[in-house]
């Protein structure tokens, strides 16, 4: 366990922003994490996972703890279900592939989501009609103040749309060390009706899809829209899809009859933020060394040497323009640091 001073964080954030940490420590075990927290818990700390859901707009004047806890194991199983424990430092997509290899179903729609296991509950990651909370059982987290290891059930986590207790009431107080999820072993329930999954399956002549087929379809769709962070810096979807009241939607639809939507309840409707951004003329627009991706308007990109502040200014311009044109507020999904 080594602490490095004035460490570059460029390799550890998918936007590829050149920012430095006052100090940096790679954490490979819970004991190591506990030891570091015991010594430094009262000092400024910054917890780093996969670096896929943040925009660095400044240097980090803190000790950066990079959580790289590894391990996947079956905790319990029945004839039809299995509970799997995955450590926080495991890559999410690699975990999905591991589950598919063992024919465990339930997270195939979440294929190719960037980031690590430990940050998945914080964000309640979701895609194509499935959210983490649908399969979540519990997680363990180390309390920074006293290094106690605590268990959080699904109800404890207060999951919402890209929300959890870890982003709200207890933000910055815990470090998630592992997550338990329950998946199906047989009679998998397939989610094919959100987005273009079914048309992707049809295009490939698949009439009786497996969970692997669903995963392949999702991967194909995502790769056709989303740039590879190893080639172009980005954090995937930068904005949340706004949820508005039914009355607001009726007004919106009267002015923009072609607006796509998804009913989320009797009284609320989700509108794709990407559609709003595209209609506002930002899709594919480039400003110096940063801009909006030409295939997916939800994605802001760093073409090489953009600063976090420049990308943040673009995000704020998009937000104010959407508000002016559609009278809708869109929130960032990415954490602004």
Image (tube, grey):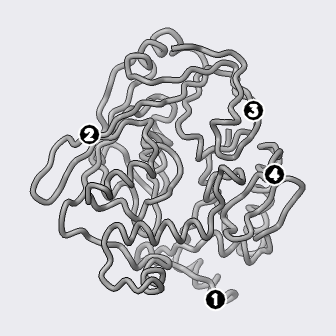
Q: Which residue is mark 3?
A: 19
Q: Which residue is mark 1?
A: 258
Circles 2 and 4, Cβ within 8 Å, touching? The answer is no
Q: Residue 192 falls in which quadrant of the image?
A: bottom left
Mark 2, Cα crowd under 10 Å, few <14 / some 14-19 / many 20+, is: few
- State whether residue 325 is above or below residue 19: below
Which mark is first along the chain, 4 or 2? 2
User: Which label sits in the foreground, 1 or 3?
Assistant: 3
Q: Residue at x 40, y 24 (%)?
A: 143
- State whether residue 152 is above or below residue 310: above
Location of residue 173 in the rendering, given as x and y in whole percent from the top left corner: 47, 28
Disc 1 secondary structure class: loop
Disc 4 secondary structure class: helix
Location of residue 176 in the rendering, given as x and y in whole percent from the top left corner: 41, 34
- Determine the residue located farthest toward the left in the rendered image: 79
Circles 2 and 1, Cβ within 8 Å, touching? The answer is no
Which mark is first along the chain, 4 or 3? 3
Q: Nearer the viewer, residue 161 or 287?
A: 287
Circles 1 and 4, Cβ within 8 Å, touching? The answer is no
Q: Which residue is mark 2?
A: 73
User: Which label sits in the foreground, 2 or 1?
Assistant: 2
Q: Label 2 to label 4, Cα distance in Å?
A: 43 Å
Which mark is first along the chain, 3 or 2? 3
Q: Residue at x 63, y 52 (%)?
A: 235
């Amino acid at each position: 366990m080594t602490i490095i001073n004035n460490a570059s964080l460029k390799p550890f954030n998918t936007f590829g922003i050149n920012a430095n940490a006052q100090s940096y420590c790679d954490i490979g075990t819970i004991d190591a994490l506990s030891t570091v927290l015991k010594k430094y818990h009262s000092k400024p700390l910054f917890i780093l996972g996969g670096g896929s859901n943040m925009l660095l707009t400044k240097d980090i004047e803190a000790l950066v703890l990079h959580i790289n806890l590894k391990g996947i194991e079956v905790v319990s199983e029945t004839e039809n279900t299995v509970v799997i424990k995955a450590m926080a430092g495991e890559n999410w997509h690699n975990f999905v592939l591991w589950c598919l290899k063992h024919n465990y179903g339930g997270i195939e729609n979440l294929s190719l989501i960037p980031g690590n296991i430990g940050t998945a509950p914080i964000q309640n990651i979701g895609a194509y009609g499935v959210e983490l909370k649908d399969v979540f059982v519990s997680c363990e987290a180390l309390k920074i103040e006293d290094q106690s290891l605590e268990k959080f059930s699904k109800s404890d986590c207060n999951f919402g749309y890209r929300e959890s207790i870890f982003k709200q009431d207890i933000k910055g107080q815990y470090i998630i060390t592992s997550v338990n999820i329950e998946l199906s072993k047989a009679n998998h329930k397939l989610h094919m009706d959100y987005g273009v999954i079914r048309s992707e399956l049809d295009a490939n002549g698949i009439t009786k899809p497996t969970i692997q087929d669903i995963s392949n379809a999702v991967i194909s769709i995502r790769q056709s829209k989303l740039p590879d962070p190893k080639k172009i810096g980005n954090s995937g979807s930068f904005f949340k899809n706004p949820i508005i009241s039914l009355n607001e939607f009726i007004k919106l639809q009267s002015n923009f009859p072609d607006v796509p939507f998804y009913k989320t309840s009797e009284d609320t409707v989700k509108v794709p933020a990407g559609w709003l951004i595209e209609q506002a003329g930002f899709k594919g627009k480039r400003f110096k060394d940063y801009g909006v991706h030409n295939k997916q308007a939800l994605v802001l990109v760093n073409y090489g040497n953009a600063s976090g502040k420049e990308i943040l200014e673009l995000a704020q311009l998009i937000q104010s323009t959407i508000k002016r044109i559609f009278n809708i507020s869109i929130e960032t999904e990415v954490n602004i640091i």
